[in-house]
Each structure stands twice: as C-alpha cells, then as structure tokens.
Amino acid sequence: LRLGRLAWLARLGVVIEEQVHQRQQALEADGATVLALAAEQRLLALVAVEDQPRPDAAATLASLRRRGLRLALLSGDRRAAVERLGLKLGFRSDELAWELRPEQKLERILNARQAGPVAMVGDGINDAPALAAADLGIAVGTGTQIAQETADLVVLGDRLAGVEQALLIASRTMAKVRQNLVWA
C-alpha cells in the first residue's frame, strides 16, 4: 500500500482518472488536505483531512493580541487550509504562511528575532527546530515527544489558554523579582 499526494502516486504509475482529480480539487477548495491510498497501480481511496481549531484558540489568540503581542500562523499545510483556519481564528492574510518545511519555519523565527524576542508555540516534529530557535519555545502537551523535549515550556493538556496563563505567571514572577530588587 502507498499513501501520499495524488501527483506522487501518478509518478509511481498509479492510474488516476480525471474525475478523481476533480474530486481532489473540490475537497481542497473546501480547505481539506487530500491524500490518496493505492495498492500496486490501482487507486483505492481518497482521504481528506482538515485541522479544526482547538475550542479555546480564538479566545486565547484574541487575549494575546490585547496584550500587545504580534501573532502569526506558520504551517506546513496547504494554502487553502491555512487561509480557512486563519479566517476562523482572526488572522490577517499577512500573518499567515503555508506549505512551510521545518527549515523554513526556522528561518521565519530567526528573521523575526531580529526585531525582538520571539515565542513559538508548536506541537509537531516539524516545529522542533523553530521551537529550539525561539527565545521561548512552547510545546502543547498533547504534541509529539520531540516538540516537548525541544521546547523551553510545555503547556499540559491541549488547551491553548495554558500559553496565556504561563505568560501571566512569568509576568507576575518578574514583577516580584523587580520588587525584591528594589527592597534589597
């Protein structure tokens, strides 16, 4: 069995009819990433997957924006899927990047660091290099082991609100440190 993009399977000699390409285009237009399953030279199925935002994502992102943080969405997913997710979460088009390989995410983080400190939130293998390069790498606890090991901070569970809570705790801790220095 082989599972991958239709174009890759076609290069391997899998016979793909025109109606399958039309179905792929329709699914991708709706924001799905489409994979195909083949056995030998025969196409068996199309598999459409679509990321759903975490339930607390929109509220957490809005709260982070109110704190004055600049946000961006860096993804390895296809453009249509990223734009659709970005629209749901309130991102502007210039805050979105799609079809990024791990080294491209890393490059974006390194470029952003030239303007000031950068935090990166991620949960996958492809996020690990960027998590390591960020001033503050934050892994979501339900993510991959390598993301958790690379990050500076792991937010337990799958709630993004944990990111905001961690920043609040850090801010209060630094305020207490400054207060103690003044008293000393």
Image: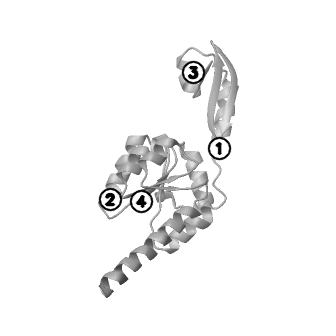
Residue at 42% x, 41% y: name it. Answer: 102
Q: Tell me the CA gap for discs 3 and 1.
A: 21 Å
Reading the image, the residue beneath label 4 is 119
Residue at 54% x, 42% y: name it. Answer: 78
Count every numbered label the image shows and give the total: 4
Residue at 66% x, 24% y: name it. Answer: 18
The local secondary structure at tag 4 comes to: strand
Q: Is residue 97 above or below residue 88?
A: above
Q: Tell me the CA gap for discs 4 and 1.
A: 26 Å
Q: Nearer the viewer, mark 4 or mark 1?
A: 4
Q: Amino acid at mark 1?
A: Glu
Reading the image, the residue beneath label 3 is 9
Callouts 2 and 1 close, C-beta under 8 Å: no
Q: Tell me the CA gap for discs 4 and 3.
A: 38 Å
The local secondary structure at tag 2 comes to: helix
Q: Tell me the CA gap for discs 2 and 4.
A: 9 Å
Q: Is residue 170 above or below residue 131?
A: below
Which numbered tag is attached to residue 158?
A: none
Q: Tell me the CA gap for discs 2 and 1.
A: 31 Å
The local secondary structure at tag 3 comes to: helix
Instruction: Say which of 108 and 56 sits in front.
Output: 56
Please tell me which of labels 4 and 1 falls first in the chain. 1
Q: Amino acid at mark 3?
A: Leu
Reading the image, the residue beneath label 2 is 113
Determine whether, in the image, residue 77 is placed left or right of residue 31. Answer: left
Label 4 Cα crowd, 10 Å radius (few <14 / some 14-19 / many 20+): some
Label 2 Cα crowd, 10 Å radius (few <14 / some 14-19 / many 20+): some
What colour-coding does the image apply? one colour
Q: Nearer the viewer, mark 4 or mark 3?
A: 4
